[in-house]
Every structure is written in C-alpha cells, then in structure tokens.
C-alpha cells in the first residue's frame, strides 16, 4: 500500500531556531497538506497545497510557517524562529482528488522545542 | 462545516462488534461523512466514507439513515489492535481541510 513518508521522525530544536520538516507524498497524488497535533489535543489543519500554491491555510499558519514543493517528490514545512508552543506532532497528508478517496497521512514528525 | 458529536469513549471485548454513532444535525446537501482511525503517535488513517444508506469495505461498515443527521461506524469482531481513536468528519469532497474533533477512544479488552 502506498505511503506518505515523513522525515525526521523526531526533531529536537532550540527555541528561535528554524526547522524544516520533510514529506514525500504518494506519487500520483495532487493535493498536499500539513496538520499538527499538540500532545493530548485535536488534530489541527495548518495548510493545503495544490498546483504549486497554497489553497487554504488556518489561523495557525502565520508568517512563521511556509511550505514548498522544491521538486517533484518532496513537500516541506518550514518553521522559522521556533517557539516552545510549536512542540507537537506534525503530520503530512496527501490526496488524489481532494477528499474524494480520503486523505493518506504520514506517521508524523515529533517536534520538540526546548 | 457541520458540527459532529460522538461519544468520548467506548469499551469493548475482543470478538465483539463495536458501533460508534456520530450526530451531525446540520449536515449540508453536499457533505459526505468520513471516518478516520488514529493510533497513538501515528497519523490518522482513512477508514470509510459515505453519502447515504450503507457502505461496506474490508474494514468497516457505515450506516447512514435517510435524514443523514447521524451515522454509525460498525467495526465487526474487534481485536486488541483496534484500540484507537475514531473520528467522524463531515464535509464536502472538495474541502481543502479536515476538521477533527476529539473523536471516540475505543478500548478493546481481552
């Protein structure tokens, strides 16, 4: 079964540093997403990306965040100047045709800001 | 987005059928109902999606009454590995985002 691959699985960074979380979506999928889940809380939408541009973003996704699809396979989330409250699991997801056949999520990157 | 309400938790035993009902009174005409499963420290996993009546796949069945104001996810003969959080989501097929609630924590005991 095709998978969404995320690296690294764990990332520890110091407050104020920049981090880049990487994702390889399923190869024939056209829609890409980032979600996050703070420990013990709900899964929250951050951003969706289609046709090389952001389709929608949440209030969480402020100027501190950016996404990029630098080549035909990777999809990255950059967090500039990390804060303690950015500590969370970050999930990448992709879908073939919007939500018609469901989204496939990766296993996540656990980001810890110290 | 239609608001959904589902039980916070459910307990079951191996081999039993588990039915989780989700209320979505404000569901819109174009909305579909989708269920996801999440294990600890893993991303949500798509289980099943439906619009009306009944949908069945190799994992679960989804029952949707005619008024579509609720839906029931049925997990047949659960095992310990089905212990997870189950989310009911309502939205259009072309929604660019999913809105997760607190979900239902299902605990399967031996």
Image (cartoon, rainbow, N blue to C red):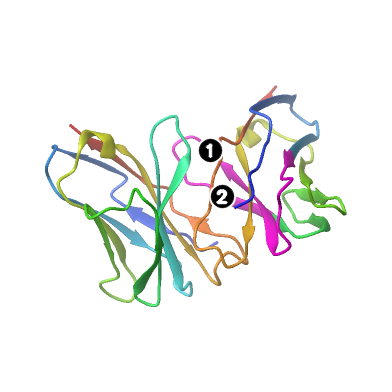
Residue A72: quadrant of the picture: bottom left
Q: Quadrant of the C terminus of chain A?
A: top left
**Looking at the image, which residue is at 58% across and 64% down?**
A99
Q: Is residue B60 above or below residue B9?
A: below
Disc 1 chain ID: B
Q: Which residue is mark 1?
A: B39
Q: Secondary structure at mark 1?
A: loop
Whether B32 is among the magenta residues is yes
Return the x and y of residue B30 as percentages of the image width and height.
Answer: 70, 64
Spot occupied by residue B37 in the image (x, y as percentages of width and height): 60, 43
A65 to A9, vertically: above or below: below
First to last magenta residue range: B22-48
Q: Is residue B66 left or right of residue B87?
A: right
- Give neighbour class at mark 2: few <14, some 14-19, many 20+ (Cα, 10 Å): some
- Do labels 2 and 1 touch, CB within 8 Å? yes
**Secondary element at image label 2:** strand
Classify residue A25 as left or right of residue B104.
Answer: left
Quadrant, the N terminus of chain A: bottom right
Q: Residue furthest right?
A: B66
Q: Residue at x 54, y 44 (%)?
A: B100
Of the image marks 2 and 1, the number of the one nearer the N terminus: 1
């Amino acid at each position: 079964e095709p998978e969404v691959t995320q690296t690294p699985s764990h990332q520890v960074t110091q407050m104020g540093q920049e981090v880049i979380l990487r994702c390889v979506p399923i190869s024939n999928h056209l829609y890409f997403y980032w979600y996050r889940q703070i420990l013990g809380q709900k899964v929250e939408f951050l951003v969706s990306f289609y046709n090389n541009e952001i389709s929608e973003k949440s209030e969480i996704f402020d100027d501190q965040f950016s996404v990029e699809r630098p080549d035909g396979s990777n999809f990255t989330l950059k967090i500039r100047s990390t804060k303690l409250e950015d500590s969370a699991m970050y999930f990448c997801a992709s879908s073939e045709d919007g939500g018609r056949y469901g989204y496939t999520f990766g296993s996540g990157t656990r980001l810890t800001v110290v | 987005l239609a608001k959904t309400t589902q039980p916070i938790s459910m307990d079951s035993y191996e081999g039993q059928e588990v039915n989780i009902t989700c209320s979505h009174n404000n569901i819109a005409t174009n909305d579909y109902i989708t269920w996801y499963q999440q294990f600890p420290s893993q991303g949500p996993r798509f289980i099943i999606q439906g619009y009306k009546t009944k949908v069945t796949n190799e994992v679960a069945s989804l029952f949707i009454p005619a008024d579509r104001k609720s839906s029931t996810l049925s997990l047949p003969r659960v095992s310990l590995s089905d212990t997870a959080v189950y989310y009911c989501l309502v939205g259009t097929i072309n929604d660019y985002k999913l809105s997760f609630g607190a979900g239902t924590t299902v605990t399967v005991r031996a």
